[in-house]
Amino acid sequence: MAPTIAAAGPNSIAKKEEEEELRKRNQELERELKESREREEQMRKELQKTWERLRVAEEAEERLCSQLGELEAESVNEARAYNAHILSLMDQLSKANLLVHNHRSSAPISIL
């Protein structure tokens, strides 16, 4: 009987070593899985923060575009008003020049 026990002994030891290695590998894989899930959760949180910043930036862009449109319309209106004022001044100057020219040809004007 001794030879049978002795023969079973090395197999039993080898099996235990193999089981121990499998247990260690399983623990290592579980630890890696846990770390991977933690990294995934961290990335999900970062993605959510980035998404929120993008939403805020898009809203700011929309407000800026709206304000820019309003400023452009205001500047066009002001340019038109200035142009009308310049045309009015040119007309007044032209009439004043005609008066001066007509008056010079009829009689001298004394400023004093």
Image: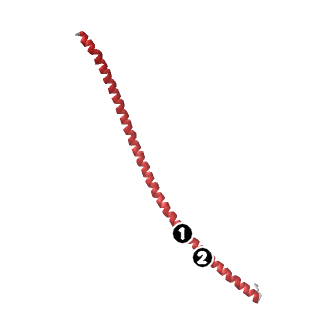
Residue found at the far bottom of this picture: 106
The answer to whether 83 appears left or right of 64 in the picture is right
Q: Which mark is residue 50?
A: none
The percent position of residue 95, horizontal first and vertical second, equals 67, 83
> In the structure shown, which secondary structural element does the residue marked by tag 1 occupy?
helix
Residue found at the far top of this picture: 2
The percent position of residue 49, horizontal first and vertical second, equals 42, 48
The amino acid type, in three-letter code, at marker 1 is Glu
Q: Classify residue 4 by image quadrant.
A: top left
**Residue assigned mark 1:** 74
Residue at image x 48%, y 58%? 61
**Residue assigned mark 2:** 84
The amino acid type, in three-letter code, at marker 2 is Ala
The answer to whether 40 appears left or right of 4 in the picture is right
Task: Compare residues 112 and 46 and report the one nearer the observer.
Answer: 46
The percent position of residue 78, horizontal first and vertical second, equals 57, 71
The percent position of residue 24, horizontal first and vertical second, equals 34, 27
Residue found at the far left of this picture: 1
Specify few, some or many for label 1: CA neighbours under 10 Å numbering under 14, 14-19, or 20 or more.
few
